[in-house]
Structures are given as structure tokens and as C-alpha cells.
Amino acid sequence: MKKILISALLTISLAACGMSNTAGVPAGTPASPSKVVTAKAVLESMATAKYKDGELLVKFRSGIASKTLMKAHDVMGSTVLRKYDIVPNLQQVKLADGLTVAQAVEAYMADPNVEYAEPNYVRCAASINAADSFFTPQQWALHNTGTFANGTFGVDIKAREAWELTQGNRKFVVAVLDTGIDYDHPDLVSNLWTNSGEMSVHDFRTNGIDDDLNGYKDDWRGWNFADGNNDPFDDIGHGTHVSGIIGAVGNNNIGVAGVMWNTRIMPLKIFSTATSKASLCGVAGGFVADEIAAIQYAWRNGASIINGSFHTGLDYCVSEYNAIAEAETHGVLFVAAAGNDTHNVDLDMRTPAIFDLHNVITVAATDQNDRLATFSNFGPKAVHMAAPGVYILSTVPTNQPSSFGGEGYDFMDGTSMAAPHVAGVAGLIYSYYNKDVNHFTYLQVRGLLLRYVDTVADGQNLEFINGRVWTNGRLNANKALTALLQPTGLTATATNINEITLTWTDNAKGEDNYIIERKIAGVFTTVGTIPFNSTRFVDTGLTPGATYEYRVKAMAFLPNPPSSGFITGDSFYSNSATTTTPTSSSGLPAASDGGGGGCSIGSRQNRATAVADSAVILMPLFVVAVLRGIRRRKK
């Protein structure tokens, strides 16, 4: 019903006035935002949060001279540890001995040159048909035969169907902010990102030189931000498991298959087992200052997607928000795990789920029967969608014991496992639609993921996530990939001296409309919009003996939370078709009504344009009715 209403709305608005191509425009791309923060709010957040003693994140207002910044630190007796470009004028500082974090927050924020000061909050690592040895039946999330763990047949993300279109593309880099990665793992090694700017990448040895002048020496295979070195090896297993879900090499006759068989995974280690950090979280811990540095490193080095499968506290870290927002201005998607505390994150305000940013996708976990996992956090506003996160088999370091019995592979549960399924499918969408040209923006990739999910309407047990996540749905790779497939076989036939009939093959599975364009004065211009599943259009009012060229594309409305309303996404254009109208109607049928045209209210019109133009007058009332209906459904 929602699809019909959306289609009707768009058809009314476009039939009379046409539509420009917006697929390549990153609509809604924000300037780097900055939240208004008070000392009171920071101190209240600190009361329930963990943070590092003796350190602070201080952001000065724009336009402040360097001497003024240093003077502020001198007054406090502080030392600058790190400066960030991703959040301008943000600095990590070490406090003078004897000064508490709370005292420092109040003192810094009393300085009119300081925008905000906040603790270096703790971040914790989360608990934890391919020809591949363990694909069937163990990898039920990709292809569920119903024979593993009493699962339900068909309850999966339809990876096999999606792989018929694409298995990924090494052009697209996925940064994994986690515990590191086993970079020698045979199922991962050929899909790892390497920094071509570092000379050491060529001979696999360090030379102690920052060859590419990015501030990191010998970072040829990523960086260990937690321990401050160039070795991001995984000493826990969590990051390797997440990486395998995203991009274990597929169809190689060993182990498991990732969602993307071809990709480049960038290992950015932000959690450490060092005693000082592990004691904060139980297993492996880290700090938000390192996370921000890793986000900055990721977008600077070409990552299209960042996977953040980790726990956050109840703090609201403005610097973290600003870093992810800045990554959005560079077109980077941030896929976040919702967390494993059975909480409604709409109420307990866990970040980054509650960040009102258009590049964040927050993911809950479902089991092999499409029920919300018993441990999963949820939230009908802040958590966007669900994905498989129970009994997930993936890669682990080969030097660690495995309960599964296969060296280098094991099962894990968690929203940490759900998020990389979404990150992997985002990579598949980029790979298919942006392989040769940047057709989809990050907003459109996100919109495809959010709209084309499996819901209770698709059967199974998805009523168990109804009202628990924003989409009411679970990830479906094939739906997202096939929603806007390119129309093919366009033909143009002159059926009268002033009429041409177009026909084509409808391949898209989720379009709302088809847009018809005719070349006028050397430029393609929209001449008609017709509803989904259409394969025929009649263009009228043409000139006898004139040659016309056409092309067609599918279009869909895509959600863009937290904003109300939608953005548009469209398919690649069909082939072009050209024909010439005859100069005489001899032997041809009489002209019929049909076709489209530009805005023509008040001018002479045929029946089709008269109806469409009249509808434009009533469109505001129709819009209100549709939006009210959708909002009621959300409630």
C-alpha cells in the first residue's frame, strides 16, 4: 500500500512537470556540524560514563590563533598529545598532575575561546553457495537451508542471489575499527587493504620512514591506534571475525565466504588487551580519542564504509559525533552495531545509534528463525534495521583455539556480527552500481538498504522485530541490489505522423516510476513519468518527418532518516532508441491520446496532461494525506 501511495504521489508531481536527474547529487550532504554543549551537560554525561583520567578532548572555536590556544593550555598546565583535522581545532590533551577531569572541564569551558571540553571516553570491544568448506549449512545467514540449529528455510539475506549480479569489487575499501585482524589468515590475506604510499608495502619490511607523509611510519597494512604502532594484529579474535563476515575470500574451496568475495579491508585497531585498557572493559578496551583518529585515517585513505562493531557507554561524545559527521561530508557510510544489552536505545541514548546523521546505519541482530536476538538492543527510531547475528561462523586468528574445531574459524553471536553483514551488502551495492561511474551516493546506498528489507509481509517470523527497528525489517541483499536494475531492449516505433510508441523490458524489482526522456536541442529532457511495472509509453504532439531519440530509467523514493521525506535514486539509463515520424499518415492508424510533456497548466492540453495538471493543484492535500498515513504506520 505504501508503495502505491508513494508511486501515485510521485506520478502526480512529475507527470505534468518532469524531473531532473538527481542520482549523482549527494542530497542532504551536511556541512560539518557542531553541537552546542554546556559544562553542565558534559558533567552530567560523565556521571554515568567511563573515561581516562588525566586526559581531555578540547575543541576551540574557529578562528582562534595558535598562540591563544597554547596560552590556554599553559594556564592549565596541559600538554597537547594529538591534534585532529577531521574535527578542526580539536585537541587531545594531558592534564597537569592533581587536576581532575571534572575540574578541567569546568576550567576550560569557562574560557570563551573554548567551544567544549569533554573526557576521553572509554570504548569497549563487543562480546563476542560458494565453494567454501563451511558454507553449507553453517553459514545460514547467507543461505539458510533450515538444517542448522533448527533454523527456518529461507531465513537469510539472499546472498547467493545477490552474487549472481556481483561478488564485490576491490575498488571499494571497508575500514574495520576493531581489535585488529589476522593479516596472515588464508581466507583474508588477498582481500586486505595495503597503503601503496609506504615503501614497505613492496618488500613487506619496515624502513622506519613515513614515506607518504601522513603522520604514520610504515603503516603499509593499517594502524594500531590502541598501542600506537604499525602492527594491527588481532590478539582477541573479534576484529578478524567481523572482517571475515564482510570480506572472506569466496569460492576458494576453503573456510567461509564473506558477503563480498572481492574487497579491500582496512584494519584499524582501536582496542587493546593491554592491562590498563582491558581492565576498563573486561577483555579489550580503548578510548574515543583513538576512534576519532581511526575515522580520520579511514576517510583520508579512501574508505567508502566504516564498520563499528563495538560497545559505547551512556555518554554523549560531541567529538565522536563531529568526527562521524565530517566523514559524512566525504561520503563515508558508518555502520554501527546496536549493542548487546537488551536495551531500547531510544531511551538510554547510546551512541552512535542516537546520532542524527544521515551516514549512520545502526543494526540490531536476528537469529536463524528471524526473531530478534535475545541479547540485541533495539529502538524504533535509533536502530534502523536488523541483520543476522546469532551462530555466525567466520574467520578467527589461526593461532587461537577454536570451539568449532576448524583452525581459523569459529562461531560468535552479537550485533557485532549483524553490522558487518550490512556493511558487506553496502559494498555489493557500491560494486554493482558504481563499478565504472559513481552512480549512487552514500545516501542512495543507505536508502536502498533501508527500504528494501524483508518485513512481516514477507512471512517467516519477522513480526518479532515489528516496532523494534525503524524499518521493521531484516537485511535482504538481493532486494537492495535488484530494486533499480537497468531497463533493457528499448525500442521506438512511429505509430503516426505525430506519435511514437516506446517499449522496453522492465528489470527493476522495486521501482516506483519510469522516467522517459527525449533529446531536445541536443539535450535529454523528461517528457513523461509512468508508474512502476510499466513497459510502454506513447509520446504525442510530435512533428511529422522529424527524428527523435529516447532513453528510459527506473526511479524510486528512498528513505533518509532522521529527516522526514525521501530522496530519489534511479537506475542506469536504458539503451537509446531513435526513430523518425512519417510525413504522411497514409496506412497508419489515427493518433491516440497519451504521452507526456512539460508543465502546461492554462495552455491547450490533451486529456492525459489535463488530468495530470489538474492533479497538481490538489497535490498539497494529497501529500498531507500520504504523509499522515505513513506516520500512523510508523507509530
Image: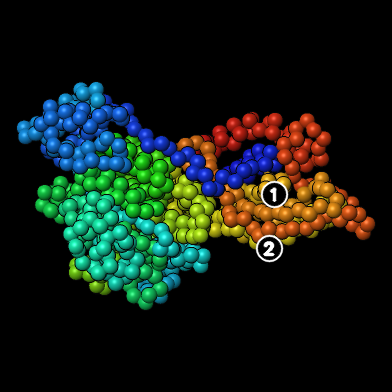
Q: Secondary structure at mark 1?
A: loop
The residue at 64%/30% (across/down) is 621
Q: Between 91 and 406, which is closer to the camera in this rendering?
A: 91
| Left or right of residue 298, residue 489 in this image | right
Given the image, on which type of amino acid does mark 2 rest? Gly
Neighbor class of circle 2 (other Cα within 10 Å; few <14, some 14-19, many 20+) is few
Q: Could you say which disc has been placed on residue 83 in the image?
A: none
Would residue 416 be seen by someone viewing this image from the given angle?
no
Find residue 413 and report its horizontal and vertical position in percent.
Answer: 30, 58
Disc 2 target residue: 489
Disc 1 target residue: 522
Rounded to the nearest angstrom, the CA distance separating label 1 from label 2 is 22 Å
The residue at 75%/35% (across/down) is 600
Would residue 631 be seen by someone viewing this image from the given angle?
yes
Find residue 401 and report its horizontal and vertical position in percent.
Answer: 19, 68
- Residue 500 position (above or below residue 261): above
| Left or right of residue 587, residue 377 in this image | left
